[in-house]
Amino acid sequence: MADVKLTIDGREVEVPRGTTVIQAARKLGTDVPHYCWHPGLKVAGNCRICLVEVEGMPTVQISCNLEVREGMVVHTESAKAKQARRDVMELLLINHPLDCPICDQAGECKLQEYSFEFGSDGSRFQFPKVHKPKHVRFSEKVTFDAERCILCTRCVRFLDEVAGRDELDIVNRGDRNEIAVARGAELTSPYQMNIVDICPVGALTSTDFRFKSRVWFLKQTRTVCPSCSRGCNVTAGARWNRLLRLVPAENQAVNRWWMCDDGRLAIGHVGADDRLGAPLVRKDGALVETTWDEALRAAADGLRAAGANLLALVSARLTNEELFLARRILDALGTPHRDVKPRAWERDELLRTGDGNPNAEGARILGIAPRAGGRGLAAWGGSAIGAAFLCGEDLDDRPELLDALAKASFVLVLDSRETATVKRVATVVLPGVTSFEKDGSFTNVDGRVQRLLPVVSAPGDARPDWRVLGELGALLGCGAAPRSADEALRALAAAEPAFAGLSLGRLGALGREAAREAAR
Amino acid sequence: MPLAPRLMKDAPPIGRRQTHDEYVAAGGYDALQKALGMKPEEITQQVLEAGVRGRGGAGFPAGRKWTFVPKNTGKPVYLACNADESEPGCFKDRQIMERVPHLLIEGCVIACRAIGAQSAFIYCRGEYPHSVRALEEALAEARAAGKVGNDVLGSGWRCDVWVHKGAGAYICGEETGLLSSIEGGRGYPRIKPPFPAVEGLWGCPTIINNVETLANVPVIVRDGVAAFKAAGDDDTTGTRLVGISGHVERPGHVEIDPAKTTIRELIEVHAGGVWKGRKLKAVIPGGSSVPVLPASAIDVPFTYGAVRNAGSLAGAAGVIVMDETTCMVDALVNLMQFYHHESCGQCTPCREGTGWLEKLVTRIWKGEGAARDIDLLDSVADTIGGAQAGKTICFLADSAVMPTKSFLKHFRADFVRAVEEGGSPVWRARAGQGARAAAGAHG
């Protein structure tokens, strides 16, 4: 469609016909204050904070529902526009509890931000406030405070328009209005926690995260959710070296603004009690701590001895770089027996892919699968196992295989947790880290290579898996160990056409598509 | 001052409904027969030329509104008749619905013909059970007589009319709140654009007209534009039905020629004058939402333009009369309770502001206010809206602001007195009674 030229605050901008003024302003880097408007939801036009002045129009206009017109002259900072905003701010706060000191939203609250920017330092309202229900349970995941709510209906619209579950609405009328679930019901949407993120104020809080930390103390890191092959972009918040929450980070090519609740809440493994903090070797039937040098040497010796007979199970939860380094080792050993353990994950139409391996696509591109004559995981139970390498994997859910592995002469396990597999069958244990503790990349279901960044540091002496696999490869004569995940990705890029030209820096915040056609 | 009964010419007395046969005997449904022989655009053109302005209050030319229906969208077109008549002081539409319902039904069917609709919904306020019953009985007669239904007057054209009852919310009289309500949703007014003529009921083009507006359509089609324009002037064509209430000897309604009837005549001639021989203090001419006029400003004809020039709006023609004993603080408390209670709560300024207005004026009313509260009341009113403010989706906030501002402008002395004398006379009398009762109980 043809572009329309207009002027906003004295600057010209050209946008496609049908664009709204608030969007055109964003193109100029001007963020017109807004509560109810959200780029991923239909326009509601109820908060009235985005009022602007338009030359030739007698009344102020909400910029969220005003389509641009050729030659339009908009003022977002004129006296009239500013007064209108100040008026709305004053009214939003008269019945608001102003309980910022105990509110979880403080620090990332639009009411606070706009108050700070253009609000008043006092109130002309000297009456008892309207009281409404507090700490209302919307579900086990979401808690609601009706007094903090500004009735912007983002939550109502998200559940209806995006999650496809019309589970919230407004009851009562006027300044008694409240958001509510149907009587006796609770929210059921598997995406319901997104309403906590898009709530511009402290009305909707995450039952999991609330009261854990003031948000300004969080170290916020952009990374990728490891729960399925969608690879939703997330902002991970950590404090005291503890991962406290995940919230979705916008990426229009992947998850838009959203993520599923299961992915969001799947962070317990990071700070789990059974994390491995030191290399272990089995002596006289018991696992004992040892040094990295000794453990790596024992691992290399065992692998070398097994050679082409080694059964390898490589996790598609490892990064592209790690899969590449693992493949290098298996190639050096000449074993055709390599496979990936499938991981089920509930599928839906919105984001969840059904594949619980976050780097399933990376593993596919890198060809982590049985070679000619190779023994895949399905055939591990068939006959005795001599030596095995569980690279980032466990078989806790396959007790019959653990029985077989218990009889093997050598079982090398690289993992971040002391699983039943480690306890029962490992001969050598190399402590790796979780995806929240390392640098690297995943390739998502659509072939987009996305960057992981460390959010917290791993316990004890655990090392990033890329480093472990690099050093192990060096001992096996595969060449020098990469000194960084970036160096590993550059080596991968040089070796695999699908990743040609990539480096961690080049992935940027939003990732880049792998040249998958080249891999086929 | 000439009476100009046109809509109500053949109306039976209050309490009785004109039957289908009576209506037909008086020439009823002739206009429909005529309209069926016309092209839809010709009907619209006639209504356009007649210049009939919306009788629901906004005064928008009905014919022009009809031209906004987009052509060839492939979607059905709907007609919604606003019969919510929820504006305090207004009771003119019920005269039509309860006494000459066939006039409205005929108007609906002709309007449908003009705009290309085959369904009309009459959204009638729930507090009007008599209107609903009259409409439903009349509709049954009209269906039986082939005036409404699958084969209108044997033309093979289908057009149906339905009565939809409201549930008591003022906001559902706002035209887009009305649409939300018909659809079964919460009575929330809708942001514009899209305008209802483009996306109304169920996302389809919808024209919304007031009862009296539609009742004028058969008159225009039957008698022609010139005859219609014989009443009124260029600004306000045709007659107006006016309701007069408050401190008058004979409250009621009357159909007038607006160009030849002043507000004073409405009160003094048609309503028998201010009651009890008292003097006039104030008039709200168009229903509770419009600015109040002082007694000195009422010698103006009841046209849209003349009343606007006098500082108010003819609105929905609900003339509320207040005599010299009225304390305007009392009156404003009543109005603010209403707007606060009826605010749908969608837009911030109205949701939060109407309550604040009520609290402020109540404080003054009870004698708990200070002089600065009067200025604050005026200032808070500016904060939430006003004429040409555009701060909210619909006009409810502005409807609370206009009385507030005008009460303070014309009758500030009443507010000052309430502050200085410890409350309005009514409040003090009531508090005094309370005190006496309490003293009695303890004595």
Image: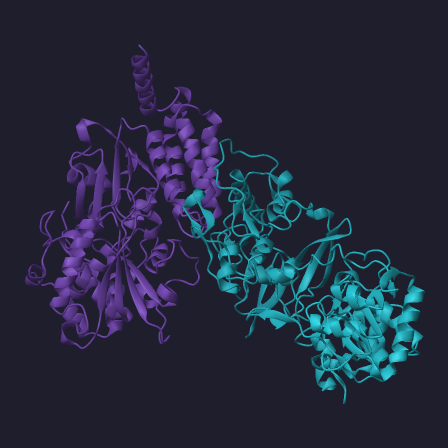
Chain colours: A cyan, B purple
Residue A279 left/right relative to A405: right
Residue A77 can be seen in this image: yes
Give the quarter of the figure containing the C terminus of chain A: bottom right
Q: Position of residue B177 (x, y in %)?
A: 37, 55
Q: Is residue A103 above or below residue B230?
A: above
Residue B96 can be seen in this image: no
Front residue of this view, candidates B433 and B116? B433
Q: Position of residue A88 (x, y in %)?
A: 53, 45
Q: Is residue B184 above or below residue A172?
A: below
Front residue of this view, candidates A193 and B350? A193
Q: Is residue A445 above or below residue B89?
A: below
Q: Position of residue B123 (x, y in %)?
A: 27, 56
Residue most extreme to the top: B443
Residue A301 left/right relative to A422: right
Q: Position of residue B57 (x, y in %)?
A: 31, 51
Residue A86 left/right relative to A380: left
The image quadrant that residue A371 belongs to is: bottom right
Give the quarter of the figure containing the N terminus of chain A: bottom right
Residue most extreme to the bottom: A372
